[in-house]
Image (cartoon, coloured by chain):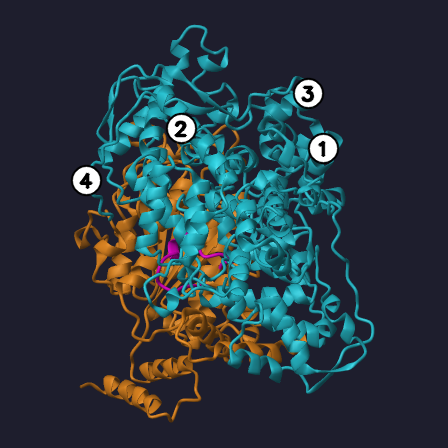
Amino acid sequence: MRSKSHSIQHVSVMPNNWRRNWRRAGAILTLVALLTSTFVAGISAQNMKAPGTKSAAKLSEDQRVLHVLNRLGFGVRPGDVERVKALGVDNYIAQQLFPEKIDDSASEAKLQNLETLRMSTAELYEKYPQPGQLLRQLQQRGALPADLAAARDNRVKGGANATPGANSPKTSDAMPGQAPGEMQGPEMAKGSAKTNVPANNDANPMNNPEYRKAVMEYYKENNLRPAQFLTGELQMSRILRAVYSERQLQEVMVDFWTNHFNVFAAKGADRWLLTSYDRDTIRPHTLGKFYDLLLADAQSPAMLFYLDNFQSVSPNAQLPQQRPGAARGPLGVLMSNNPQQQRPQQQRPRGINENYARELMELHTLGVDGGYTQKDVQEVARCFTGWTILQPRGGGAAAAAVMGRDARDSAGKFIFRPFVHDNGEKIVLGHKIPAGGGIKDGLMVLDIVAHHPSTAKFIATKLVRRFVSDDPPPALVDRVAQTFVKTDGDIREVLKAIFFSPEFNSAGAYRAKVKRPFELAVSAVRTLGADTNGGPQFHQWIARMGQPLYGFQTPNGYSDVAESWVNTGALLERMNFGLALVSNRIPGTHVDLSRFVGDMNGKAIDKEKLLDRFVTLIVGGEISPKTRETLLKQLSDQVTLPATMPRTQVASNSAPPNPFEAGFQRGILAPGGGQQQQQQQLARVDVAAIDNPLVKIAGLILGSPEFQRQ
Amino acid sequence: MNRRYFIKSGGIALASFGLMTSAPTFLGRALAETIDKVTGGRRKTLIAIFQRGAVDGLNVVVPYGEHSYYDLRPNIAIPKPDGGAESAINLDGYFGLHPSLQSFKPLWDSKCLAIVHASGSPDSTRSHFDAQDYMESATPGVKSTPDGWLNRYLQSKADSQKSLFRAVSMTQNMPRAMQGKSPTLAISNLADFSIRAGQSSASMQGGFEAMYDQTVNDALHGTGKETFEAVNYLKQVNPSQYKAENGANYPRTPFGNALLQIAQLIKAGVGLEVAFTDIGGWDTHVNEGNQQGQLSNLLRQFSTAIAALYTDLGQRMDDVVVLTMSEFGRTAKENGNRGTDHGHANAMFVVGNGVRGGKVYGDWPGLKGDQLYEGRDLALTTDFRDVFGEIATKHLGTTNLKSVFPGYTGSSAKFRGVLG
């Protein structure tokens, strides 16, 4: 199926410490150089003439401002162009490369009500348990309240009789604790993205109203929250930060790396593990050394679970039962003695799992043609045996907490278990990894692949594709890969090489990328200066357009080329999204178009004047004559705007209410209301709003081919 | 030159002389399709149905002739056929259908329903996630396969009609099985496939259409044009006014609605070749039930919907095959909660007038201790790709089995013969 080149690239292996110290020194030097430089490289790059095709022509200064705001961020807010011009584009880029120095308190304030973002994985297990699992744990501890047991047994007997059609994936919460809206918002709960998701337990528990009520009451009494909030709050945080953060490049890079190291939220325990993944694995390493990011990722419980490495053990490893006294202490346990991990359908780890080893090389570092063999995959897998997770599914944290016992701080943390590690000698990509290395085996593998020339090329290609063009110019990829090698995989330096390249700053790259749904939705909000709580109803639109956050099932992540996103159904949803946004039909999101025409209220105004104002606002004034002509036809010749426009909520810096929590308190498990409510919202169209000429114009421009590009 | 080719070329010539320039290209295609129908050119359609959650095949197609079955399942076994509604429906003296599958019996009797038992994925995983992934990519054990098998089928064969509705999944999101390079549509509700702006919908759509209707040669404009051609075509089909034929009665559930809408697309002659939908809730670890209960209720919905589709499509079932699948079977022995846990092999249904029905296909491995896979599950005797492959080859007409099922070592010799 895939051709794999068998040439093995040799990289010298130096002792780890020695190498690390040099790297650190290099990083400091680079930092100093960057801080004191006046971006000489960038300016000279800009002046360089790329070979004389038209598409290599330089951008005007105004275009470059828009280009940078679109590519290094999620679009242009009102006033952004002026701000960046005043600052200077190069200075703006320089600022963005050091996000930690940009004050972002206003954006962070918006996340205040999302408590899960600040909780440890163990705390999440404790406070956001899955109902079925919690009940089992309580039962095993003899602490299951009788009414709850009765409600459970009753709904099981009731089965599909309890609610007509309940067992269909399209209405059901097929997964315990995964109520509609968990992954993709309530609408998405109907579809297969959700039902792709394994049901790992009893069928549709939450469809029985009595059971649901009993669980809700129990949760409220014990200060517990439904597990589906976890992904919901994480998605919300990504949307809020993309919309409001001043650290726009940081958010773009979080998106890039989250996608590069893709993890699917609905695979087993990953729902609990992704919060830490975003906070502790991705965010701190977006612009640092690639090796550090790769190491953090290799040791992240989310990735260890997603690609099964947590259960990869040496076939020769002794089972704990065979080891006296092994049941105590984290190092002594092969699998936690938590019974939920020994459910009959769960296989005990029986040996090596190659999944992570393969994807590490194919998707995270070398690329599919990067020069590794199946033998390398097997050897790498042996190196990572024993890289696992302590109590990967929480180890009964919630039941223990409910029963007043001490929480287990260790649940869901990375751990190396030496006794299941394959301690023999391995050969990886031509390098000998000596026997007896323990955890060092995996570290050596990461070192080898992070510094492999194929990795430099692979990462350079992906970054150039992201920031410049769907067809990465080979010359630029080569230069960027060289920078990667020279700077020891310094992502910040690699990005500089891209941002100040003639290719990035050429007419051929300008508006050449089709926005992906997340970018489209966020940029629409930013462009109109709209206010959003980033809640499930907003995320649902991103999902409808095809890109639910943390909703990509396979490890390759979302595609970064236009052809994957421009298809009939998705394009229609893009247009409908724009219409829903401007007519304020997305609950939790508010647009006030009247702020852009304050001087025109109550007057008869020329339609061209009105149109030009919105064309400037939304697509920087750049629109094809045909589109302009079409838009003009939509307006009557003389437009009189109402003297008073209906004013909607104006953007504020205060934290938006958490729709998940609000829904829960109202007794609705699914965030933002149930699916039926959601459908009603979809069907309810504010006709008056759509008839408003401003709404019409803004809606059409958001749905225009021009706004789909960046 | 045969007549069909002549007429098709005629249509194309008409368009190229500008006489049809005002007609959308897709309607031009629809015209070609109409001509196809007139001249007897027909489109074969596959409807693939995924039962997500792993259905308990041993209680669906019951091996009542096997003593071990009753030993293994003291509480949840389906009683041997006694002619009543509370026992298995006899098929061949050894296997019986779950009594909730009563509406399948006429299809069996008229030899339009075949069963492939002890079938499934050769991979040993008991993870829903992995097993669904493997079955939809049709590459057991390989996770990095970028596309689904149905999409690879579409890639393997050019579509002479270039239909926008060649491949439709009646689901909110594109299922893994249909993902890939070839264009596919995921629609949860045909009536929603439109610009949604209340009374202004028509004028807003007009605005969007005009913006995208430019001769600019790029993906956005081309797709925009096709989008509105599809929207307009569906409007003519008028999905909200659909009436099922022949007294067919679909259950009013999302699964029933999905099949109803697939039938509608087939009848509308939009060029549907591959349809997909799914139904969940089969993960019966606790109180699965026997002739009544959880599984029973779900099976009733499942079978009445498929039977309604069969009735509704009438003679059109000559060109339609319905194929059901589920990621793995369940443990042969019932568990301590009167349910079943994740197992291995399972049963698949194949329905259609072209199916050599009335037969349970596959080798029966038995349910005695040493016959069970890993000592606990129904063993596998038919690779699911043997069934998928047969349908892709004999029904849909692919000639490139290797490209549709990469890594599959089987060939037509492995086909079970469910199709003539």
User: Which comes sooner in the sequence, label 2 or label 1?
Assistant: 2
Report which residue position mark 1 lands on: A218
Dot 2: within a 10 Å radius of its alpha carbon, few (fewer than 14), some, or many (20 or more) residues? Answer: some
Q: Residue A23: give its label.
A: 2
Whether residue A148 sits left or right of residue A370 in the image: it is right
> Is residue B189 among what the camera can see?
no
Q: How far apart are the alpha carbons under marks 2 and 4?
A: 30 Å
Q: Nearer the viewer, mark 2 or mark 4?
A: 2
Residue A572 at x, y percent in the picture:
52, 68
The chain carrying label 3 is: A
Examine the rendered structure and indicate whether residue A691 appears above or below residue B297.
Answer: below
Residue B145 at x, y percent in the picture:
33, 48
- Name the residue at 70% across, 77% down: A693
Q: How far apart are the alpha carbons under marks 1 and 3?
A: 13 Å
What is chain A's hue in the picture?
cyan
The chain carrying label 2 is: A
Residue A39 at x, y percent in the picture:
48, 47
Q: Nearer the viewer, mark 2 or mark 3?
A: 2
Q: Which structural element holds mark 4?
A: loop
Q: Are marks 2 and 1 in contact (CB under 8 Å)?
A: no
User: Which comes sooner in the sequence, label 2 or label 3?
Assistant: 2
Report which residue position mark 4 lands on: A6
**Is residue A257 one of those drawn in magenta?**
no
User: Which comes sooner in the sequence, label 2 or label 4?
Assistant: 4
Q: What range of the chain is rendered magenta?
A: B171-185
